[in-house]
């Protein structure tokens, strides 16, 4: 009996530690939109820096008619102003915004990682790392595109300085 109480206490503390990783973001309860078509939650940035990227995950187990879990559904959404050309917009300090969520009667979860404009991050290290890996891919791709554009510009400049047939004849 005593052993099972220790196990239960350990598991509850582990869950608390995992959910307490993001201290600079306050999440509200998940609610349905006014039109009743979508679920949303409000997150508020309590950091001194703007949130420039966030990752949310909702675990949505799918159960059979007998009540057994047949599929561990997962809904993840990553938003990053680097990847979205600033269309997302940063979430400034002390500002609350609505974000997409899942039906709380079927799914659990929420924001599990954030990256701030000053470079610090909070939350699940795997989600933070995945965001930085995507950014690295974008930067590498952009570097290659800029090299190609520079090559094209140089080639165009050379062609404009070469004499044409009409100039030679």
Image (cartoon, rainbow, N blue to C red):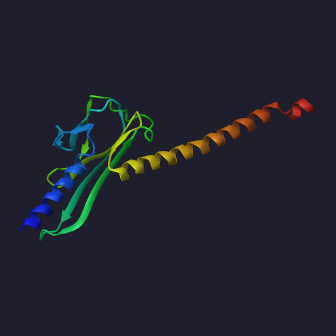
114 to the left or right of 68? right
Rendered-image quadrant of the N terminus: bottom left
Residue located at (75% from left, 38% from top): 155
Q: Position of residue 6 (x, y in %)?
A: 13, 62
Q: Where residue 2 sits: x, y (%)?
A: 7, 65
**Quadrant in the picture for the C terminus:** top right
Q: Is residue 135 left or right of residue 16?
A: right
| Residue 53 in picture, x, y percent from top left | 37, 40
Please tell me which residue lies in front, 166 or 157.
157
Residue 107 visible in the picture? no
Regarding residue 4, the answer to whether it shows in the image is: yes
**Residue 98 appears left or right of 150:** left
Q: Closer to the camera, 9 or 121?
A: 9
The relative height of residue 28 versus residue 124 in the rendered view (above or below) is above
| Residue drawn 28% across the image and 51% down it | 57
Quadrant of the rendered structure where residue 150 is?
top right
Which residue is at a point 44% across and 42% down the rendered structure image?
83
Looking at the image, residue 7 lies above or below residue 114: below
């Amino acid at each position: 009996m005593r052993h099972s109480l220790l196990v239960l206490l350990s598991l509850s503390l582990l869950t608390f530690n995992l959910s307490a990783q993001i201290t600079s973001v306050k999440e509200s309860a998940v609610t349905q939109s006014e039109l009743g078509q979508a679920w949303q939650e409000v997150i508020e940035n309590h950091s001194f820096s703007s949130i420039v990227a966030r990752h949310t995950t909702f675990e949505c187990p799918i159960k059979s008619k007998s009540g057994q879990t047949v599929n561990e559904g997962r809904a993840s959404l990553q938003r990053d102003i680097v990847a979205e050309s600033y269309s997302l917009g940063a979430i400034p300090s002390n500002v609350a915004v609505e974000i997409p969520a899942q039906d709380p009667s079927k799914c659990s979860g929420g924001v599990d990682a954030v990256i701030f404009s000053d470079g610090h991050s909070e939350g699940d290290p795997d989600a933070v790392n995945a965001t930085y890996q995507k950014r690295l891919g974008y930067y590498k791709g952009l570097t290659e595109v800029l090299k190609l554009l520079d090559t094209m510009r140089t080639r165009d400049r050379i062609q404009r300085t070469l004499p044409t047939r009409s100039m030679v004849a």
